[in-house]
Amino acid sequence: MSESNLYLSITPVKSAEIPSEEEIIRVGKELLEGTSSWKQGKVYHHNTVRTFSRSKGPKDGAGWYGRLSQHTAEDATFEEFWSKLGENKAENEMEYMPEIKKVTLIKRISPTQSVWTLFYHFPPPVSPRVFTVVQTTWLSTDSPKTGLIVSIPVDVSDNEEYAKMEEKGVKGRYASVERLRVLEDDKVEWVMATSSTPGGSIPQFIVESSMAGTISKDVNHFLKWLHSVRGKAATPTETAKVHAAAALDSASPNVEVAEASGPGTAGVAAQ
């Protein structure tokens, strides 16, 4: 892929044409800088999570939805946020998102760029979903301390070895950009924007109608899990308890739509 043609959307790149880390981070920064002009949405969780959106444009496969929250050290420090979102992101998501049953590292391109495939499973009749992405991270320790995580969809059908590593399921696609930044009052600002489709036959407008609420839940789910493992290594028993608690908080899937709560994921629909 010509780097000048890179545009963040749900259109996947081929595994042999993954753009450079610098280009991915550049377009991720540009996207978040533009969110200030997006349409303001509802505020959730006692006015702590603000949402916003941008309608589907000519080059978009779906609309974009975002959220912003600010956190004191009691919630999490910048280092705590980064250790769970900027490092081993896919594996950590599986710990606090009960719908994710398996994550597989397809290829580690560099210490800050990897290709992952995530397998989501829901109670019948909702079909399993597979999301395969390249995740790129960037960290600046200069003031203000800032970290960026960009995920873009990847089509691995051009590589037989990679394709065998994907689970069987309906292929969904998502692109997302997350930014962590220390503010002047030492709070940590967490911003996320995502565009996604679960695949299958559900109309996209139905999926997007619940997107703001879905992505706002991610904040509480993440913090609940982080606090449960803060300062200690999670044991299998503790992990099971976290999954059970998250499941109780999540909206139950139905025949039409099952929400996949978690950073950078879409509402997942029945096939």
Image (cartoon, grey):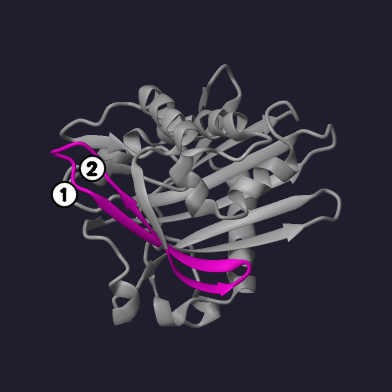
**Would residue 193 appear left or right of 189 to someone viewing this image?**
left
Q: Residues within 10 Å of mark 2 (few under 14, many from 20)?
A: many
Residue under numbered circle 2: 269
Q: Residues within 10 Å of mark 1 (few under 14, many from 20)?
A: few
Magenta span:
105-132
Which element type, helix, strand or loop, lies under badge 1?
loop
Label annotation for residue 201: 1
The residue depicted at 32 percent of the width and 79 percent of the height is 161
- Give percent across and percent down for residue 238: 49, 32
Which element type, helix, strand or loop, lies under badge 2?
strand
Q: Is residue 252 magenta?
A: no
- Give percent across and percent down for residue 4: 55, 78
Q: Amino acid at mark 1?
A: Ser
Residue 160 against residue 270 in the figure, above or below:
below
**Would residue 172 appear left or right of 13 to someone viewing this image?**
left
- Could you tell me what secondary structure mostly forms the magenta stretch? strand
- Give percent across and percent down for residue 61: 35, 58
